[in-house]
Image: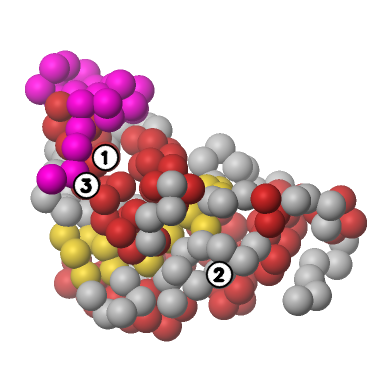
Amino acid sequence: MQSRCKHGCGYYRRLPLDQFSALGIGPGLGNHPHTQKLLQFILENYRRPLVLDADALNILSGNKNWLNHIPENSILTPHPKEFSRLFGEQSNDFERIETALQQAALLKVIIVLKGHHTFIATPAGRGYFNTTGNAGMATGGSGDVLTGIITGLLAQGYAPAKAAIMGVYLHGIAGDKAAALYGMEAMIAGDLIENLKFTQAD
């Protein structure tokens, strides 16, 4: 497939994308024009599912024609505001869930709509509510940890939908264990990482 990236892509074409079994993109990325072109190049040339979060989603919201270039079975992890920027405003949670299911099927991606009970929408039209986690996880960096967990599961060979569901579940368990140790008010994102070693998917 010939990339449509017009400026500055000569360097990007030398990136060994086929050597990476999984890519997670977004946390701390920024939205510099060169960064946007790099994301465009990856979307158009990477052949495996991606995990897209944070600034990757913000860049996509400003370049919505790129949504159709996202590799099939990629995983998008927006919070409600990022979701609205991508797919339009919804008046309530029910509409947001319906939109997530519609867009997951249309784009053939998995959408992890982060919230009190995170909702995972799959391309097959199925949706899953997560039962783990707590309000203390609404802290800076928590979503970055989730991106890392899901990307790590993809790299281990889990199917994308399973990686998303399992990743959200384990992320929530780590948060629950951290809350029990430190209290929800005192938790930081690093506590989730520390408590991942105590989690397991039953």
Which residue range is magenta in the image?
A: 178-202
- Per the image, the residue denoted by label 1 is 171
- Per the image, the residue denoted by label 3 is 169
The N terminus, quarter of image: bottom right
- Per the image, the residue denoted by label 2 is 71
**Residue 82 within the magenta-colored segment of the rendering:** no
Q: For the residue marked with disc 1, what is the amino acid?
A: His
Query: Residue 172 location in percent, x, y?
Result: 20, 40
Q: Say above or below: 200 vs 110.
A: above
Query: Residue 111 location in percent, x, y?
Result: 36, 64
Q: Circles 2 and 1: CB distance less than 8 Å?
A: no
Residue drawn at (54%, 51%) of the image: 22
The C terminus, quarter of image: top left
Q: For the residue marked with disc 2, what is the amino acid?
A: Pro
Give 155 or 130, whichever is nearer the viewer. Answer: 155
Q: Secondary structure at mark 2?
A: loop
Q: Magenta residues: mostly which secondary structure?
A: helix
Task: Give left or right: position of 181 versus 25.
Answer: left
Q: Earlier in the sequence, mark 2 or mark 1?
A: 2
Give 31 or 51, whichever is nearer the viewer. Answer: 51
Q: CA distance from mark 2 to mark 1?
A: 24 Å
Q: Circles 1 and 3: CB distance less than 8 Å?
A: yes
Label 2 Cα neighbours within 10 Å, binned few <14 / some 14-19 / many ≥20: many
> Is residue 36 in sight in this rendering?
no
